[in-house]
Amino acid sequence: MPGSLVGVADRQDPRPSAIRKASMHLLRSERFPAFLLLGAAALGLVLANLPFGEEIIHLSHVEIGPEALGLNLSLSHWVADLLLAVFFFGVAVELQYEMTRGQLNSAAKAIKPAIAAAGGVIVPIAVYLLIAGGSETSAGWPIPTATDIAFALGVLAMFGKGLPTKVRVFLLALAIIDDIVGIVFIAVLFATDLDFMMLAIGVVFVVAFAILSRMRSRRNQVVIVSLMIIVALAAWAFFYLSGIHATIAGVLLGLVIRQDEGMHARHALEPWINAVILPIFAFFSALVVIPQVSLEEISPALWGILIALPVGKLIGITLFGWLAMFVGKKKGEKPDLPVADILPAAALGGIGFTVSLLLSRLAFADAVVADEAVLGVLLGSFISLVLSGILVSARARTHRRRAAVDA
């Protein structure tokens, strides 16, 4: 009976269903989430610098949660540790798919974007250390190594009509490998006072999650899904208590879940990640007071990130990507992508944003330096966004003109 009543209601007024479908489509698109991220970060930065900005920043540091369990965290930490773990879960599910069925499922497919990604890590690190390596800010070298997949693909979708599919495939593989590097940095560099007992219990819950994901059927799906959520939260809590950054729990859960279950979960979570989790994280991360100091007093970390993201990524990915195109090629064979197509992808790689913002908060204990590092990420990513928009548009126009001539 309830189902039939719903059916009648939908036939009488299909607008709510149509609106809901349109909303979900918009939130799963590649363009709109990029606008949400940018808008949330801009709002956070503006509000933090208004007269009542200090009150908002203070609110982000208010601690809530069960103190007896060691989970009495500030609002900003709940966002960066718990909500971002959901984002990393989605990333890991996509990574699992790409490594088994997608663009990274063989050495031949992975080698070229992997070489380009190596350039996009090594050169920005070198640029950062040249600028900020001789001071107390040298710990910030991992920050400019990340690429924000959502932003990069959003800009490509917005300005890249007419570009070959190979460019998107190359960029996606490159960004995923970048995420792997970022995840390794978070797990290895920012673990503190490791509690191996807590870590072992967390791993047990990850294994239990993997087993449960392979037990779900139509008969027991509500029970199993409920248990999976409880077990996932337990795994997250024990990873947090172990001293490893809690987002690593999200990564492991995404890697061990049964693939079809993982893709289904990612599809269901995608609108929430795009519309809620990432904008909230961007907002909290951008709650930074712009320092009222001279240029000479600004931390080298800001300059290092500001230059390493747009310049280091552009040079590193372009140079290494060009060299990678000759791997496995016989003499005289054309590369899969010419330099002119690699260049816009390299510029898109400089949009660090989400993971770079997280790394900025992890790299520096000094809150002032961390805030300036965040400003460096925002400014560097914005420069990369503008530069990539110009390069992608120009290259897309060239391809459209060629297609028109060939037609």
Image (cartoon, rainbow, N blue to C red):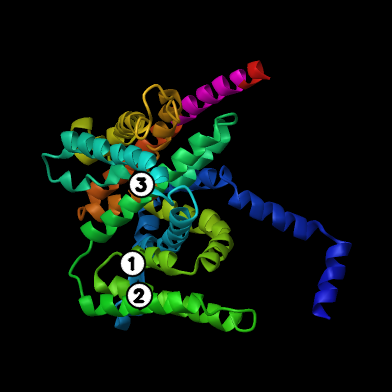
Circle 3 SS class:
helix
Q: Amino acid at mark 2?
A: Ala
Magenta-tinted stretch: 388-402
Q: Is residue 385 left or right of residue 289?
A: right
Circle 2 SS class:
helix
Magenta region includes residue 394: yes
Circles 3, 1 touching at the beta carbon (< 8 Å): no
Q: Is residue 268 left or right of residue 343?
A: right
Counting from the top left corner in percent of width and height, residue 190 is at 23, 59
Q: Amino acid at mark 1?
A: Ala
**Which of the two discs, 3 and 2, labels the residue nearer the N terminus?**
3
Residue wearing tag 3: 178
User: Is any atom of residue 287 visible in this view?
Assistant: no
Residue wearing tag 1: 246
Magenta: main secondary structure equals: helix
Residue extending furthest toward the front: 330
Q: Amino acid at mark 3?
A: Asp
Q: Is residue 81 above or below residue 212?
A: above
Q: Tag 2: Cα neighbours inside 10 Å, few (<14), some, or many (≥20)?
A: many
The span from disc 3 to disc 2 (Cα, nearest Å) is 26 Å
Residue extending furthest toward the left: 134
Residue located 51% across and 44% down the image: 34
User: Is any atom of residue 176 visible in this view?
Assistant: yes
Counting from the top left corner in percent of width and height, residue 376 is at 31, 39
Counting from the top left corner in percent of width and height, residue 113 is at 38, 40
Q: Is residue 285 above or below residue 392?
A: below
